[in-house]
């Protein structure tokens, strides 16, 4: 096993990986941009290296700087988290060429699954069901329109590269088709540098259900349950749960077997997720494979008792995974809410300095946070500040605990989407467990603004606490002039350059 691992990421996922590294006695190394110099993940690492200015392209996406940070700190492996360089085959190869271990799948698997059309052809050859659609990029809009008429509207125009809802257009009428193709191409070119798009039949009232898989170098391949991810806004997941309240046990077992087949088809290694669209008739179709750890992985860990990051470390080190399919028995139910620094009504970002913070605790609550009471949320990066997760003996208890966790959450100085989650969890379709990806298409009731006195009281308390902390810090500095730095007091060898 490794002695030191660099985490090529920031925020809550960097901290999440650090915790498993420390559980194993492995020294974590952080990287940061100038905007993140005082970020929580920097303060929690044993060693931290600045990799560039605020812009991601010049810092977190700067392969040379990240590899140099690994060399300078003596890291033996790199964990990419999710986002940034996590699904970049070129970077995975460069990590190996530098004599380091890539804690992720082989570059070839990343390339196969990174292109949706290549992925589609690969899994289809392995017998995995796919949504009826074109297997080649659209080159002749008229021919593509003829295909769309054949399978029947509505259809989806989708970018071949990338994801996150970019380069996607739902087309309900033939007369809108050519314009949708042009718009999707422009957006795909701007987001991914590749304007290739293809066409798929749109599944009416679809559920977005994904299967967690693990594969090692010893012939082991398992699926670790499923996650329901249908509560989405603009193709972005907002609330996830495990297990899915919609699919049947028969569908669950069939999807698990198919997910393993898809992973084997690209010679996969490590942790990955195979995503499916499931129709109202329980028919399911391959959507894509994410060749990394998913944002929503905690709900799987809570229900199955598996540390997915630890399994990633085992597999990357050449060891067999610690889990076997017959032992993967779900226990209870888990829900995750993504807490964003954004207005719950307008969805506009709300960056800024946090002036007061309190996370929920108690039975069945897990918080994966990327900030604390001393943090600033920058404008330049994803606005997610934490993931609130709850576990219950059944779905009803997990949801009730989530309402409690949301009520106990206090983040002052910025606006969060906390109120939006309350509204989603109370939506009749969500409560019934029958919601699909259109559940948030209709605007929810506006958030009830908190009582002014309550907010003023919290702000006052936060201001007093910050003042007292500053006074204590000043007294310590006066009592120890020229004393050791806080980093050395903590016994940490920092690299801040």
Image (spheres, rainbow, N blue to C red):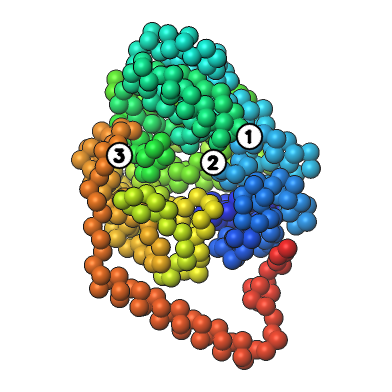
Q: Which mark is residue 416?
A: none
Percent from the top left, x then y, of residue 282?
32, 22
Percent from the top left, x then y, of residue 293?
54, 41
The residue positioned 42% from the left and 27% from the top of the image is: 169
Judge left or right: residue 302 versus residue 289. left
Q: Quarter-wise, where is residue 74 in the image?
A: bottom right
Q: Which mark is residue 440?
A: 3
State the residue position of label 2.
293
| Viewer-side label of 3, 2 | 3
The residue positioned 35% from the left and 78% from the top of the image is: 460
- For this rendering, which residue is in front, 129 or 439? 439
Q: Residues within 10 Å of mark 1 (few under 14, many from 20)?
A: many
The residue positioned 41% from the left and 67% from the top of the image is: 413
Mark closer to the chain start, 1 or 3 = 1
Mark closer to the chain start, 3 or 2 = 2
Q: Quadrant of the C terminus?
A: bottom right
Percent from the top left, x then y, of residue 2?
70, 50
State the residue position of label 1.
105
Q: Residues within 10 Å of mark 2 (few under 14, many from 20)?
A: many
The residue positioned 73% from the left and 41% from the top of the image is: 95
Q: Residues within 10 Å of mark 3 (few under 14, many from 20)?
A: some
Mark closer to the chain start, 2 or 1 = 1
- For this rendering, which residue is in front, 196 or 419? 196
Judge left or right: residue 289 versus residue 51. left
Q: Secondary structure at mark 1?
A: loop
């Amino acid at each position: 096993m490794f002695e030191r691992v660099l985490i090529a990421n920031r925020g809550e996922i960097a901290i999440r990986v650090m915790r498993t590294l420390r559980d194993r006695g492995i020294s974590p190394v952080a990287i940061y941009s100038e905007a993140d110099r005082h970020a929580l993940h920097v303060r929690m690492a044993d060693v931290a290296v600045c990799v560039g200015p605020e812009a991601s392209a010049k810092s977190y996406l700067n392969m040379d700087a990240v590899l140099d940070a690994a060399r300078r700190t003596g890291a033996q492996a790199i964990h990419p988290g999710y986002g940034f360089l996590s699904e970049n085959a070129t970077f995975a190869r460069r990590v190996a060429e530098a004599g380091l271990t890539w804690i992720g799948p082989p570059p070839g698997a990343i390339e196969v699954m990174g292109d949706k059309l290549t992925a589609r052809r690969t899994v289809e050859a392995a017998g995995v069901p796919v949504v009826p659609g074109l297997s080649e990029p659209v080159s002749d809009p008229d021919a593509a329109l003829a295909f769309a008429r054949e399978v029947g509207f509505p259809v989806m125009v989708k970018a071949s590269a990338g994801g996150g809802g970019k380069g996607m257009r739902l087309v309900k009428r033939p007369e809108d088709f050519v314009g949708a193709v042009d718009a999707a191409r422009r957006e795909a070119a701007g987001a991914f540098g590749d304007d290739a798009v293809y066409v798929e039949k749109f599944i009416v009232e679809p559920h977005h259900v994904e299967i967690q898989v693990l594969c090692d170098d010893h012939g082991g391949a398992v699926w670790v349950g499923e996650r329901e991810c249908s509560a989405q806004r603009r193709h972005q997941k907002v609330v996830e749960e495990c297990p899915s309240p919609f699919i049947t046990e028969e569908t669950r077992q069939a999807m698990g077997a198919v997910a393993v087949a898809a992973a084997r088809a690209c010679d996969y290694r490590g942790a990955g997720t195979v995503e499916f669209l499931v129709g109202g008739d329980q028919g399911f179709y391959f959507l894509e494979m994410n060749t990394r750890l998913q944002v929503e992985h905690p709900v799987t860990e809570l229900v199955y008792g598996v540390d997915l990051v630890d399994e990633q470390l085992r597999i990357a080190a050449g060891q067999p995974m610690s889990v076997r399919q017959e032992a993967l028995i779900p226990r209870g139910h888990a829900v995750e809410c993504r807490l964003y620094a954004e207005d719950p009504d307008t969805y506009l970002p709300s960056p800024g300095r946090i002036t007061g913070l309190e996370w929920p605790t108690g039975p069945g609550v897990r918080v994966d946070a990327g900030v604390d009471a001393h943090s600033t949320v920058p404008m330049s990066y994803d606005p997610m500040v934490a993931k609130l997760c709850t576990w219950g003996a059944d779905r009803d208890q997990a949801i009730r605990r989530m309402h409690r966790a949301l009520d106990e959450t206090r983040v002052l100085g910025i606006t969060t989407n906390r109120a939006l989650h309350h509204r989603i969890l109370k939506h009749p379709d969500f409560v019934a467990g029958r919601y699909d990806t259109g559940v948030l298409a209709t605007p929810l009731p506006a958030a009830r603004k908190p009582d002014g006195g309550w907010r003023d009281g919290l702000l006052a308390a936060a201001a007093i606490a910050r003042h007292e902390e500053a006074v204590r810090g000043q007294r310590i500095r006066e009592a120890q002039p020229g004393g050791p730095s806080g980093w050395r007091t903590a016994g940490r060898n920092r690299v801040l350059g």
